[in-house]
Amino acid sequence: MSIKQQIDQLRNELNEHNYNYYVLDTPTISDFEFDIKLKELKDLEAKHPEFFDANSPTQRVGGEIIKNFETIPHEFRMYSLDNSYSKDDLKDWEIRTKKLIDGDIKYTCELKYDGASISITYENGILVRALTRGDGFQGDNVTANIKTIKSIPLKLKGDFPSKFDIRGEIVLPFEGFNKMNEERIEIGEEPYRNPRNTASGSLKLQDSAEVAKRPLECLLYNLTGANLGVKTQFESLEKARQWGFKVPKAAKLVSSLDEVFEFIDYWDVHRHDLPFETDGVVIKVNSLQQQEELGYTAKSPRWAIAYKFKAEQVSTKLNSISYQVGRTGAITPVANLEPVELAGTIVKRASLHNADQIEKLDIRVGDEVFVEKGGEIIPKIIAVDFSKRLPDSKPTEYITHCPECHTELVRQEGEAQHYCPNYNGCKPQIIGRIQHFISRKAMDIEGLGGETVTLLVNAGLISNYSDLYELTKEQVIPLERMAEKSADNLIEGIKKSINIPFERVLYALGIRYVGETVAKKLSKHYKNVDALANASQDDLINVDEIGVKIAESVQEFFKSEKNVLIIERLKQFGLQLEISADQLKEQTDKLKGLSIVVSGVFETLSRDELKKLIEDNGGKVSSSISLKTSFIIAGDNMGPSKRQKAEKLNILIISEKEFLQKIE
């Protein structure tokens, strides 16, 4: 046997033993025998570096030092899940789902593990990349750290696709977490607060050898990619297991919502027996074809929903109420609490939402209050313990003037929040708008963070986001914690941002109610900022998904002389305030005013590609058939009830080929 063959054989054996031990939990050799084989492989690899393999079992010990984690776009976006807190929420979700798809629906129920989300890419059965969730569009490259987790296969076995992503949760089992804390207490260190935060923090450790020492596990639950060779979610879980992944066995395929409720009720009790933290159940439509039909909202898949178990509650004293000013001028009251431990973290503050909420719950300073950490990251007060109320307590009087600039607050009819109208003179609004402008999903200015924006505003160097483009290195170097290299990076990051496309610049402007999705719709429809600025309210409302509230907000923004001057300056600095020539080439008005439904499975293009073609040609993609539907593009397996409805309403049904001919 050649040296290369010996090395390959040892690698294969050790990979199999790793799989048996960490995934199947059925070791076939002792730890001592495993260590002997691993040492033998290490020695052979050291003597023969020409046979180095980044995915060898010997590389799991880590040792790579990473100063900065590279940010890489996800090939397939990582969406977040909609949360539900009651069975009625799930019933409503099922009603919405049944309106959009035909036929019987089966569900896959899975436990929702509380860890750090990860997306791992495999090519030809080899682990090539691992990214954190990040903002869903891009994440940090933590491949070196992920390779140290022994339940993650470095090489796959079986009939896996040539390329795919697999998503899951990095978790820290209670046993390992407790052991880590015992060791920390022994050496006089502060114990870690909870397994979830510790798992998440582990992914960003700079030394992968340190990550290797932590007993992390990876529980996988979703395949993403093209031509995966599976038709259902449940089948994808079984396949992933066969390829070598650790897939939780609690998942269950059910045929009704009643069976979903049984699954929830069982695990609400038995979750405390699990070795990991879990905070709910995820319910997914099982058929991948039906998932495709249902599609996504701007933030979440329509085909899945998370049911959250009842949140932990504690009681503590409300010491004071302070008021924060957001970038839109919205005032948010915040409860300052006597510090208390809740769900593994120390809670000192909680959101009070608005004046109505304070009045409704009759919250007063000095009260003993019940605090809950539910689906939100920020805890909230859910009730007051009136039995402990002090006899001299007085009702809370909501502030009448801005806590920062002292301008009298306004509250529009139908609005829950109070606002500071001092748009151009209230410092938190100015800082907030600039922080939004530079954020990841907007201009993504490298080298410039929220704290630096505050320093720049306080130093009088900028008063709006257009001022950023006149900053010089000499101006920023005197700022606190600003070294020469940091100053260079900041100025370079600002220069680079002029290449950001129009839809993101429009989002960055911070027009109230204009989020990412609305900015995309408006940029595609109007093509440049001047056309948008001159649009009438009626014209705006005719754009897909734009309502009166958004239309009024857009018009109000462009009525401001100061905003118009800022945009003129941004034009002079070369920012992209119109869509590019390449995008213009792709777009036509051939389908303008048409509402089109896409249904079934297609041969040439994917459903997403068809939807993009519709939008690029001025059409609107609709998820349901109605009198407003212009025509339907039907593929194989179009649902019979959709076809019947179309025929009843006399709506034209065309094939994929006919549609492509139509737009050509």
Image: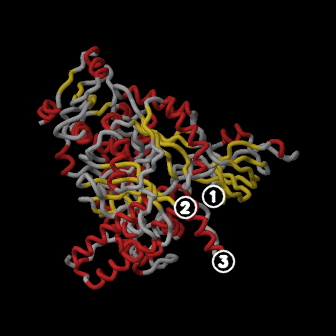
Specify the quadrant that holds the C terminus. Answer: top left
Q: For residue 654, what is the image quadrant? A: top left
Q: Are marks 1 and 2 in contact (CB under 8 Å)?
A: yes
- Pointer 3 residue: 188
Secondary structure under tag 3 reads loop
Res 615 seen here: no
Whole-percent x, y for residue 199 in the image: 51, 63
* Mark closer to the chain start, 1 or 2: 2
Disc 2 residue type (three-letter):
Asn
Q: Determine the secondary structure under disc 2.
A: helix
Q: Is residue 516 above or below residue 495?
A: above
Q: Nearer the viewer, residue 158 or 430?
A: 158
Q: Earlier in the sequence, mark 1 or mark 3?
A: 3
The alpha-carbon separation of the residues under discs 1 and 3 comes to 20 Å
The residue wearing badge 2 is: 197
Amino acid type indicated by mark 3 = Gly
